[in-house]
Image (tube, rainbow, N blue to C red):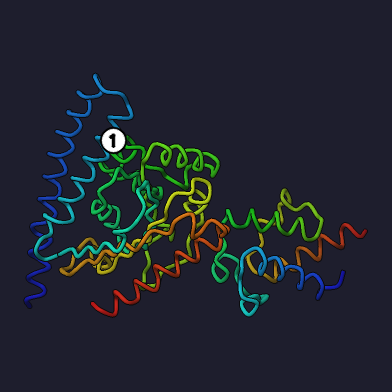
Amino acid sequence: MTRILKIACLNFFFYPFFIIFTMIAFTNLGSLILLLALFLPKRKILKLLRQAIRWYGAVVIRVLPFPLIRLDYKNYGLNDPPGPYLFVCNHRAASDPFFMAVFPYEIVQIVNIWPFRLPALGTIAKIAGYLSVREMPYAKFAAKTAKLIAQGVSLAAFPEGTRSRDKSVGQFHSAIFRTALETHAAIVPVCITGNEFAPPIGSGFLRPGLVKIHRLPALTWEKYGTFNAFKLKNYVRDMIAKEVSMMDKTE
Amino acid sequence: MTEQEVIKLINEVFIDSFEIEKSKLLPEANIFIDLGLDSLDVVDLVVALQKKFTVTIRDDERVRGIRTLGDLQQFILTIKKEIGK
């Protein structure tokens, strides 16, 4: 009974506040960005916009669902070299892109087709230069990602391409790993658990719980430079699967 | 080239280029689901196969229909036979 009450409370409060906050944030943010665009160069505007998305995401994941959904972020990459990074994450929930807000960097996310179709969020993602990997040929994707890395922008990808339905880590697509091999950028494996209830596949109802995010130490070019794309994607996949399995066991 | 020779050479490609364990290289293994290749990996696979068998298969429409290792083995056998004629 208590759990049902918690679910009801969580959803009753989260969604209205989420919609109101999104409308306020996007209206003000949109106006500010449009105003600044008159004076600042495009690169600076994009940097500001991506920073603003991070702040927005931080509120959505840390404030709006609190205390019924809590976040436990552990950074095991304290000795990582400076970025930009390629964040490679397992994927269980539609909310995963919001969790990228825990990383204090300018990030462009590599997404599937459907996030671009979301009202407001999809439009902002497009303006912020997020990449819809399935809507462009690989050569174009490679050129865009190489340019972003050269500008110091980190990338975040969910190389399973679709949400896992059974907590397993699916096969990885290799596009982001080809970017790594071409740019020599450090790969940061990111493991997310507990998010499978935020919300579950096929349901819009959030469930109370603890979402754990573990940032593993970066895999640098010195470590992966001799790998090919196939070996690299499976190597990173195994690292993530092993950590995720341990995280699930300590729920 | 016999069927066994073709299978052996294809297996070598998967082992050398993709470091896939020999035990996984079964005719019924799905190249995408069981062996974990994606569309970009398939481009690498085609290049490696062309080199191994000295054939050109990149633009062959039949490549698109290949799903399992058995399909691939039959495809290469067919190609080799066509070249032999």
Q: Which quarter of the rendered picture does the C terminus of chain A lie within?
A: bottom left
Residue B84 picture location, percent across and down: 91, 60
Q: Residue at x 49, y 56 (%)?
A: A222
Q: Residue, x 32% and y 37% (percent of image)?
A: A128
Residue B49 sits above or below residue B11 on the image = above
How busy is the neighbourhood of tag 1: few (under 14 within 10 Å), some, or many (20 plus)? some
Which quadrant holds the N terminus of chain A?
bottom left
Residue A202 seen in the current view: no
Residue A111 position in % (x across, y down): 38, 49
* B65 horizontally vs A181: left or right: right
What amino acid is at disc 1?
Answer: Lys
Residue that mark 1 sits on:
A47
Q: Is residue B5 visible?
A: yes
A30 up-or-down from A131: above or below: above
The location of residue B46, given as percent across then percent down, is 69, 56
Query: Which quarter of the picture shows residue A201?
Result: bottom left
Nearest the viewer among A157 and B2 is A157
Please give left or right for residue B3 compared with residue B34 in the image: right
Provide the secondary structure element on which disc 1 rests.
helix
Residue A31 image position (x, y, % from top left): 17, 28
